[in-house]
């Protein structure tokens, strides 16, 4: 099973990376939301890692529908996001 550490190591090498949030969906499969500083960097990460295989499962990457909120912040000044979903 893919872990938060696996995905952090992967995305931390990408330009504009800020943070990620890892969780399991209702089926127990991992979902990771990745915060980048710009749409250009999130697009580059998506293009680079699309179908990248982690523990024999390809990543399926798409833009998130909403931005992650930062603690103590409103929505102003937030970066763009790519959400990475593992498919089996």
Image (cartoon, grey):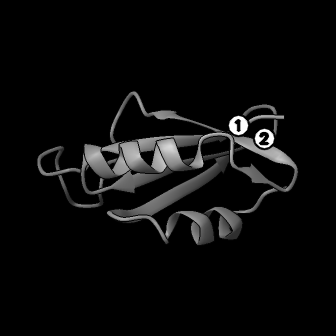
Q: How many marks?
A: 2
Secondary structure at numbered mark 2: loop
**Looking at this rendering, what residue extends furthest in the front direction?**
48
Secondary structure at numbered mark 1: loop
Q: Label for residue 29?
A: 2
Q: Quadrant of the C terminus?
A: top right
Q: Label for residue 11?
A: none
**Looking at this rendering, what residue extends furthest in the top direction?**
65
- Position of 33 with respect to 16 (left or right) is right
**Looking at this rendering, what residue extends furthest in the left direction?**
76
Picture layout, residue 8 above or below residue 30 = below
Picture layout, residue 68 above or below residue 55 = above
- Position of 23 with respect to 16 (left or right) is right
Q: Quadrant of the N terminus?
A: bottom right
Residue at the spot 11% in from the left edge and 46% down from the top edge? 76
Q: Label for residue 25?
A: 1
Q: Quadrant of residue 64?
A: top left
Picture layout, residue 57 above or below residue 3 = above
Whole-percent x and y of residue 14? 44, 64
Whole-percent x and y of residue 46? 48, 43
Residue at the spot 69% in from the left edge and 48% down from the top edge? 52
Residue sitting nearer the eye, 22 or 10: 10
Q: Residues within 10 Å of mark 2 (few under 14, many from 20)?
A: some
Whole-percent x and y of residue 44? 40, 48
Whole-percent x and y of residue 80? 29, 44
Callouts 2 and 1 close, C-beta under 8 Å: yes
Picture layout, residue 23 above or below residue 16 = above
Residue sitting nearer the eye, 62 or 78: 62
Q: Residues within 10 Å of mark 1 (few under 14, many from 20)?
A: few
């Amino acid at each position: 099973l893919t872990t938060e550490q696996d995905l952090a190591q992967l995305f931390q090498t990408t330009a504009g990376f800020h943070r990620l949030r890892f969780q399991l969906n209702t089926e127990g499969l991992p979902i990771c939301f990745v915060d980048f500083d710009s749409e250009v960097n999130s697009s580059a990460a998506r293009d680079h890692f699309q179908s990248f295989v982690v523990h024999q499962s390809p990543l399926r990457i798409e833009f998130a529908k909403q931005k992650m909120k930062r603690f103590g912040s409103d929505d102003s000044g937030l970066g763009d996001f790519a959400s990475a979903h593992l498919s089996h």
